[in-house]
Amino acid sequence: MAKRSFVWGLGRYLILATAGLLAFVAVVLVALRFVNPPTSAFMVAHQLSADDARVRQNWVALEDISRWMPRAVVASEDQRFLAHWGVDVNAIQAALDEYRSGGGLRGASTITQQTAKNLFLWDGRSLFRKSLEALLAVAIDASWSKQRIMEVYLNIAEFGRGIYGVEAASQAFFGISASQLSPQQAARLAAVLPSPKKMSAADPTPYLWQRVRWIQQQMAPLDGF
């Protein structure tokens, strides 16, 4: 009888704790619709682990960012950004089909998932972390507009070691503000996003130039921003 009471009490505690955590996440997400996050999990991790812990970031509103930059990241990272609900089931299925056919297992993270990861989580490929990322992405998509998701993403994405957000990246690599980015410069910034610590928008390799040209071709028919 005592054992049953203990199990019941533990189960009740876990349910209440989970409900409390979900309520807290919901409150935070609603608040972040209107309040710009002061930092992100990735920025904090950089400050705690890097030899050079300096973080460069300057928040700018979406309307103060060149219209080419959202198009470049949509072209590069998530061409169904305006259509899906935070997780792109089609992209996940395509990645799984490619893997089953003998190809490598590539990522299928949406811009919303990347926003969730950068803002709240940690780097890694574990199923647990990817599951949290997907759940948060769905919650973010339900709570924020696509414009707000894009604004937060462009302000917290890492574009180089210690360089977070498109304004800091534009200043560091091109000596201009984010509002002045040309289509090619926007494509160069978008091209480094998969691996910002290994690739440089300031000094593109032949591979990176090839990727820049592809992104620019994909940008042409895009609209919505």
Image (cartoon, rainbow, N blue to C red):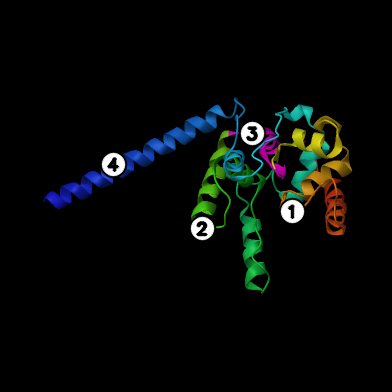
Q: Is 150 in the magenta?
A: yes
Answer whether residue 85 is visible to the viewer in this image: no
Q: Which type of secondary structure does the marked residue at label 3 adopt?
A: loop
Q: Is 77 in the magenta?
A: no
Query: Which residue is depicted at the point 60% across and 49% down?
Result: 87
Q: Which type of secondary structure does the marked residue at label 4 adopt?
A: helix
Of circles 4 and 3, the one toward us is 4
Q: Amino acid at mark 3?
A: Ser
Of circles 4 and 1, the one toward us is 1
Q: CA distance from mark 4 to mark 1?
A: 45 Å
Dot 4 or dot 1: first in sequence order is 4
Query: Which residue is depicted at the point 81% across and 34% down?
Result: 171
| Mark 1 surroundings within 10 Å by alpha-carbon count, few (fewer than 14), some (14 through 19), many (20 or more) | few
Residue at image mark 4: 13
The C terminus sits in image quarter: top right
Q: Amino acid at mark 4?
A: Tyr
Can you name the residue that lies furthest to the bottom here?
A: 102
Residue at image mark 3: 145
First to last magenta residue range: 144-161
Residue at image mark 1: 198
